[in-house]
Image (cartoon, rainbow, N blue to C red):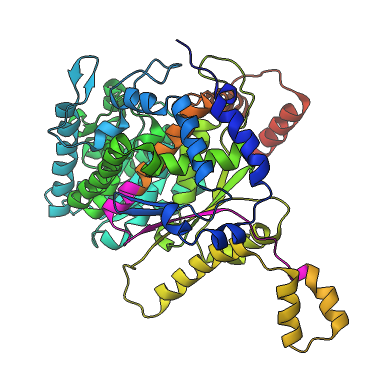
Amino acid sequence: MHLPLFNTTHAYNKLKEHAKTAATWQMRDLFAAEPNRFHHLSVSAAGLFLDYSKNRLNSDTVSCLIDLARACQVEEKRDTMFNGGKINNTEHRAVLHTALRAPQNDTVSFEGQNMMPEIHAVLAKVEAFTRRIHSGEWTGYTGKRITDVINIGIGGSDLGPRMVCQALRPYHHSDIRVHFVSNVDGHDLDAVFEQIQPETSLFIIASKTFTTLETMLNAHTARNWFLQSGNAADLPQHFIAISTHAEAVSAFGIHLDNMFPFWDWVGGRYSVWSAIGLPIALAVGYDYFAQFLAGAYAMDTHFRHAALEINMPVLLALVGIWNRNFLDYASISIAPYLQDLRDFPSYLQQLEMESNGKRITKAGTPVTWHTSPVIWGNVGTNGQHAYFQLLHQGTDITPIDFITALKPSHTLPGHHAALLANCFAQSEALMLGKTADEVHADLKAQNMAPDEIAFQIPHRTFPGNRPTNTILMNSLRPESLGALLALYEHKTFIQGAIWDVNSFDQWGVELGKILAKTIQEELEGKTSHHHDSSTAGLIKMARAALK
């Protein structure tokens, strides 16, 4: 039986009425009236702690949101995903990335087959290869050890492993440098060529079909660069494939023993747990990679079994639903107060906006509600000196997710206390704001003239009442990072389930790829097509410049 759309449920209508009252609330007053608010509106799971008390909501709001989740059958949809149901209905595929981090003794069935032996066979291959590189058993064509690993991919084949490698910087092997190339812009690859030598470089070509335009252009350029020094017979020692297309891999010159497979039920933006994570294992060692997988599995276990009322991914998702659909906040800023998480906002952009940036329900009808907000951000404290002015006093209200660790991985004195102080102060300031009376008192204490005080007050007043979440971990370790990524994966799934969109396809991405291929052929003088006057004019200018 077809489920009712979420905006036709009783819970939705109740929340719409509730939001009218909530619009008048001041978080200052909510905290003053609820001494235990922090305790009641926070939750721990898988080594993470989520404080969502600095949002314009109360326990009644949360209860109504839980009712909404149940009306949209989130629990049943969750179980269908974990059990291998083909919830990607436009591509008729299951969504089983969670199986990639499950222990070997688990059973995950897909079309009647337990996938765990196959999954762990690939992980064993990743482990064996990683140990051969680190031990020096695997060498380049001149017998020298591999010192540089260059991952060539795009989208999920780049953003995930790139972000994780950066986040786990303190765990890197000192004798291996990992580089990432994704942009079709040749400056990206050229900058890497300046840092490496062919005889000590290993290229990982990550493309499921081995046809991805950007990846294969970069791959062939890297191959040609290598062949200026080595021979075609040397390619198998320097090129590895992560793909399912054996024929194309072999034609490229990569030995099939050096092809690491994955499955069509692993979406690109959910693939970091698969062989796509090979550069992570090479960077930090397989043991740490296994801890990364274990942290994600711990969050999976919590998500599957915890009651919705204390379920961290569910609560994070529902707070987002409340802010997006009932308080009309159009974007979310991600603020990791950890320098090594600097790539995390970009990773979440793909995870959330490619998954839920949809305007059509799973049944194919237009949605009549907002779906994914815009995701953006940067590391603290840098963001404070760039865009936080807008967050404090701008005309739009933007919820923020603050993410930090209680302990640093460095030993530099004073730095981490300053970092945490800024993180906690920003969320407090965004919640409290600063009233005209408070500004007046401060300026009067500075002996400012009354006329100048009157002029300054509106400029120095902050409205406050701006929502934030704070996510804490004890320290940024492989397992806590795995749990963090799984938390946001499940948040994304829940929101897609409530909005009734397919979170696992990305047809909007495909259109641009098709048009780009046609235009590239025109730029190279191979074909000619009709375009609008703007596109035709741009092509003409580019062809003239490229002659």
Number of numbered discs visible in the structure rendering: 0
The residue at 42%/35% (across/down) is: 215
Residue 490 occupies quadrant: top left
Magenta span of residues: 459-483
Which sits in the foreground, 445 or 17? Answer: 17
Q: Residue furthest right?
A: 451
Q: Is residue 202 visible?
A: no
Residue 466: say if magenta: yes
Residue 408 occupies quadrant: bottom left
The residue at 41%/20% (across/down) is: 88
The residue at 66%/19% (across/down) is: 528
- Give the percent coordinates (x, y) of residue 297: 26, 41
Q: Residue furthest top?
A: 1
- Give the percent coordinates (x, y) of residue 289: 23, 48
Residue 481: say if magenta: yes
Which sits in the foreground, 313 or 415? Answer: 313
Q: Residue furthest front?
A: 33
The residue at 43%/32% (across/down) is: 493
Judge from the rendering whether residue 130 lies leftward or rightward of residue 27; answer left or right: left
When the figure is inspected, residue 130 is found, relative to residue 504, above or below; the finding is: below
- Give the percent coordinates (x, y) of residue 463: 70, 61
Give the position of the N terminus as an image quadrant.
top left
Give the position of the C terminus as an image quadrant.
top right
Which sits in the foreground, 365 or 524? Answer: 365
When the figure is inspected, residue 520 is found, relative to residue 201, above or below; the finding is: above
When the figure is inspected, residue 220 is found, relative to residue 173, above or below; the finding is: above
Q: Is residue 238 visible?
A: yes
- Give the percent coordinates (x, y) of residue 195: 38, 57
